[in-house]
Amino acid sequence: MDLVIGPLDLSAHVDEALAVQAVAFGLGPDEVAVRRQIVLRHMTYPGARALGATADGSLVGFVYGMPNDRTHWWSTVVEPYLRAQDNDHWLDDSFVITELHVHPAYQNRGLGRSLITTITDDAAEPRSILSAIDTESPARALYRSLGYQDLARQVLFPSAPKPYAVMGAPLPLLRR
């Protein structure tokens, strides 16, 4: 099997990417439809970029992100939680990992690690931030192994059924 990581025109491959996210994150068709519009909007933001992981030509994982902007919806939601922990400065000069998903059949092969380290290697910002479901999980363990630390926990997003943690790490990410 030939696994390749490289630039991804996410706008052109949004449906393939969301199919991976739907399986990896357990999304239904209605949620996929909402996220499709969000992804397409995000890809118009300055500095937004994406990478894909392909296996024999099929997309099996992706990551995308952008320089953070305090006026973006995500920042406006997490800012009070970060401020309460005296961590709201992390919203400035940070590259946000917006989504990172690997199809379950391809997890535990280092694809997530390669995707996130590769996309942040090109970031001009000195640090990276992201949010993840606030539970102990393989994703949170991966982020910690890369140097991400909890900046705020029990962050509630409108319509999200579970609380999230906001995590941050200096760039470049740790290599292990």
Image (tube, rainbow, N blue to C red):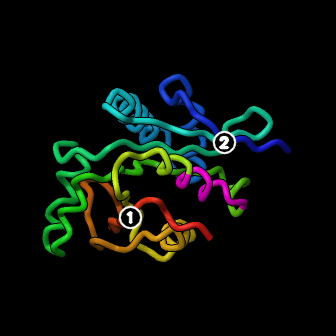
Q: Residue furthest right?
A: 1
Magenta span: 109-117
| Residue named by callout 2 | 5
Q: Is residue 142 above or below residue 2?
A: below
Alpha carbon distance from label 2 to label 1: 23 Å
Dot 1: what SS? strand
Q: Is residue 31 above or below residue 94?
A: above
Q: Which class describes the residues within 10 Å of circle 1: few (<14), some (14-19), or many (20+)?
A: some
Is residue 172 shown left or right of residue 19?
left
The quarter of the picture where the N terminus appears is top right
Q: Position of residue 151 (x, y in %)?
A: 29, 71
Residue 41: image location, x then y, percent: 33, 29
Query: 41 or 172, which is in the foreground?
Result: 172
x 56%, y 39%: residue = 51
Place of residue 129 in the rendered image (x, y in percent of width and height, measured from the top left): 35, 58
Quarter-of-image position of residue 85 = bottom left
Type of amino acid under label 1: Pro
Q: Give the mark nearer the N terminus: 2 vs 1.
A: 2
Residue 170 numbered tag: 1
Badge 2 marks a residue whose secondary structure is: strand
